[in-house]
Image: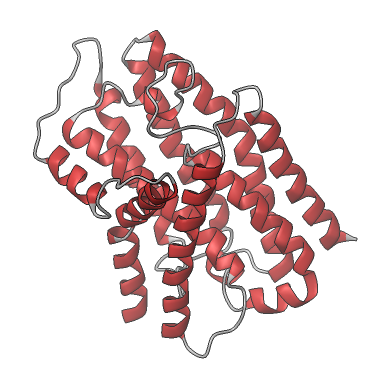
Amino acid sequence: MLLSLLQLAAFLVLPPLLVGVVNRVKSVAGGRTGPPLLQPYLDLRRLLAKGAVYSRTTTWVFRAGPVVGLAAVATAGLLMAFGGAPSLLSFTGDFVLFAYLLGLARFFTALAALDTGSSFEGMGAAREVTFASLAEPALFLCLVVLARATGALSLSQMLGEGLAGAWRSDGPALLLVALALFVVALAENSRIPVDDPNTHLELTMIHEVMVLDHSGPDLAFILYGASLKLFLFGALVVRLALGFRFPGPWTAFGAFLLGMAGFAVLVGLVESAMARLRLSRVPQMLVGASVLSVFALVLLLR
């Protein structure tokens, strides 16, 4: 129980640090000094100390968007086992709820953008849901492959000790799933090459354009929720990659934390080495992730 609570604390505290590591790696790779490692925490504190400004054209939907989005992602984190201990909330078929909670967060973010009545934010919401409709099938297929390979229908069991045997018997399929999950993680978190979280060019903005009217604590909730979501997808990739037995649960949790640091470094290197894709190329990349998942499922069913 102590380790489960520690995992929950890590999930709630470390996500902004993960974003800080990504930004720091990008700065070092570009030969720049860059922001401090703890800059995301400082940004959240600054925003929480400010007041929020609301347009007279918005309704309760605009105010509920950041809160519901953060609550949905945080609830999804309760279903994830981050180390050697099981998750705090686990039941048969919980991976379906996991995916739908992430979809709920995206839905309310897009709905809040549409509630502003701005055609600019409406454009971002349309792009977001369009790419999400291509990323979600890939995510579901990856989870189905994990369920088939491990014989479990719970995230804690799918990403638990059963992975060691699955890697020995179905290693090529799980490798394809890991690659597909990494692509989905970049797309779902609006990272390069799908989107640039630091851009302000009208023709390239996707996620950032949806939150232009948010300010103060609402913007802090959105930024914190985005870091939680990045942490969740990183946890999926890391837990899948570390699919072997550890001497004890505390060793497994330590290896997970090191793996998350490696995931952040990898994301930073990818963003430093690649340019943002044209919007017409993004669907091709997401369809490619789905194809990898389908191939993995075929390898399991052969």
Q: Position of residue 148 (x, y in %)?
A: 73, 63
- At 47% from the left and 41% from the top, the residue drawn is 189
Asked if residue 30 shows in the view, the reply is yes
User: At x 49% / y 44%, what residue is drawn?
Assistant: 272
Is 225 displayed left or right of 167 in the figure?
left
* Figure check: 178 above or below 280: below
Of the pair 110 and 59, the residue shown nearer to us: 110
Q: Quadrant of residue 170?
A: bottom right
Viewer-nearest residue: 176 or 8: 176
In percent of width and height, residue 217 lies at: 18, 36
Q: Residue furthest bottom?
A: 247
Q: Is residue 260 above or below residue 203?
A: below
Residue 84, can we see it?
no
Quarter of the image for the C terminus: give it. bottom right
Quick one: quadrant of the N terminus? bottom left
- The structure residue drawn at horizontal position 32% and vertical position 38%, both measured from the top left corner, is 68
153 vs 260, left or right, is right
Q: Residue at x 51, y 19 (%)?
A: 126
